Amino acid sequence: MYRTIEWLDDSNKVRLVDQLKLPLETDWIVTDSHERMAKAIKIMEIRGAPAIGAAAGMGMALAAIESKAISKDELITFLEKAAATLNTRPTAVNLTWATARMLGVAKATEGTAEEIVKVLIEEGKEIAEEDVCMCRSLGEHALEVIKPGYTIQTICNAGSLATVYWGTVGAVVRVAHEKYNGDIKVYAAETRPRQQGAKLTVYEFMEDGIDTTLITDGMIGTVFREGRVDCCVVGADRILRTGHVINKIGTYTMAITAKYHNIPFYSVAPISTVDMVTDPEDVVIEERDPDEIRVINGKPVTVPTAKVYNPAFDMTPPELVTAIITDKGVVKSPTEEKMRAMYDK
Ligand code: MRU
């Protein structure tokens, strides 16, 4: 695979792969505008929690350049507006985490506006580099529970494309594939309504020579009952200090089904996805356009005015989670105390 998003040093622009066109076409968006970056996040040309965190970080660096501010105060005012523009999706914590981090660095840096802009460019690149390292590291930690010969059930896309390079679930699968000489398999759930599993996960694992089988979401119970998978490994858009996992819609149903069949259920994410502040009842679950369900490939599949409920994410409670795996280690049977100990490491 390739880097989903990259800062181009020679032009101070950002290059990202257009995920709306995959897997049929590999096309790149190159931009020097934070507003264009905000659009890419909003319409999901780039998606996946860590990837949109990196996009927001680099978007803030672009905004810093665009501001042409002559004083630090002017720069901060411009950046505050840019952060509001970039925060276009409410559920993945990485987005607000990245914009807040960039603003914090801008405020804490002494110097001229020009000097602070340079610092922000480096910080945007650093967020992306850290993601590459954190994901590889969580993949290594996952070897504690992922054994040779395992078949792993996934949902949505938590692969390379959802991050900067390795993926979260992608790192778990790739590290195991590497260490176990390819003796690892994947069942990928299609993931209605946007089909990130079918369009992105299957594509990127096949590119890497990983044995991958595509199923529809409704087949998960049958696949579990037939003993086809050894564990579920899902990503996360936000993991709370309580051990609640907020991830793509369908994850909660998968976790309940896994519990019934005694199949371990793991959620993997970099520490940037862990939110130690928000309470479960305060998490905002993004609701998306009804036409994501009413229309497939541009063709209506139901009554055009059908009433639709389309939450993009759900919340899995800790009692259904066998372990949470981050770059800081494995937290089995998560509790607030264990999450805090891991976070404070
Ligand atoms: O709506 P999306 O495609 O941005 O949702 C992405 C997911 O739910 C991923 O599974 C999640 O971000 C984990 S990413 C490593």
Image: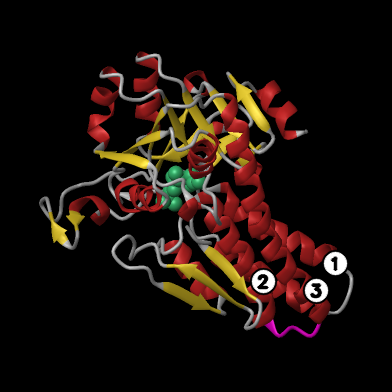
Q: Judge left or right: residue 227 versus residue 149.
A: left
Query: Label 2: which residue?
Result: 61
- The chief SS type of the magenta part is loop
Report if residue 301 lies within the magenta region: no
Residue 199 is situated, as x and y percent measured from the top left of the image, at 31, 53
Residue 86 is situated, as x and y percent measured from the top left of the image, at 55, 65
| Figure check: 16 above or below 252 | below
> Is the Cβ of the residue at disc 1 closer than 8 Å to that at disc 3?
yes
Residue at (23%, 32%) from the top-left corner?
218
Residue 272 visible at all: no
Residue 227 is situated, as x and y percent measured from the top left of the image, at 30, 19
Given the image, on which type of amino acid does mark 2 rest? Ala
Residue 244 is situated, as x and y percent measured from the top left of the image, at 54, 29
Query: Label 1: which residue?
Result: 109
Q: Quadrant of residue 270?
A: top right
Element at badge 2? helix
What residue range appears in magenta? 67-71
Given the image, on which type of amino acid does mark 1 rest? Thr
Q: CA distance from mark 1 to mark 3?
A: 6 Å
| Figure check: 81 above or below 276 | below
Q: Determine whether the beta carbon of the residue marked 2 sits less than 8 angstroms from the nearest atom of ligand 1.
A: no
Between 116 and 261, the residue placed more toward the observer is 261
Q: Quadrant of the C terminus?
A: top right
Element at badge 3? helix
